[in-house]
Amino acid sequence: MEKAILFKHKDPTCAQLVKSKFKNVEDTWKKAEQFYQEYDNATEGEQIAMKVINENNGYYFHEYDDLFDYVNNTALSWDYVEPEGYYRLQLSWGGPSDEFRIYPAKDDYSVDVIEYFYMDWFDGAKVNVPQDSTAWEVCQYFLEVA
């Protein structure tokens, strides 16, 4: 009699997922940014078409004024975390959750470092956010208005 070999499905770790999860956020925010730029320059008829296409693609950018309004209304929270000394833009929570941690420079409110964290039960990983990214721009804006 042959023994059956069972293979356990092992879920990817946060370290394996964090770059693609950051890329998903970055890509969505870039699409939103592009939508707002094109929408502002569109005719009324083009704006109506853009809204329909936007909804059909599963996005609802047209329901917000601009990129920062979109992020502000779709993120869960913006808060200061003590004693670690960073601002958190929390996008989701539970298992999994993701957030940006914005570390201000010691002498002013300019951005020193931004990290994107992807966390799942008892696991977590981070990547540094590039300064030329839309995510950096969004996080910097939130810090400036804090």
Image (cartoon, rainbow, N blue to C red):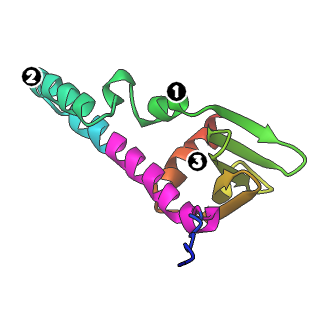
Identify which residue, 103 or 73, lies in the foreground: 73
Q: Identity of the amino acid at label 1?
A: Asn
Q: Residue 40, can we see it?
A: no
Position of 7 with respect to 61 (left or right) is right
In the figure, residue 78 lies in which quadrant?
top right
Q: Tell me residue 45's x, y (percent).
A: 9, 22
Looking at the image, tell me whether mark 2 or mark 1 is earlier in sequence order.
Answer: 2
Q: Secondary structure at mark 1?
A: helix
Q: Is residue 39 above or below residue 125?
A: above
- Find out whether the residues at labels 2 and 1 contact each other: C-beta distance under 8 Å: no
Q: Which residue is mark 2?
A: 45
Q: Which residue is mark 3?
A: 140
| Residue at the spot of label 1 | 73
The magenta span reads 11-33
First in residue order: circle 3 vs circle 1: 1
Query: Is residue 31 within the magenta segment?
Result: yes
The residue that appears at 13% across and 27% down in the rendered structure is 49
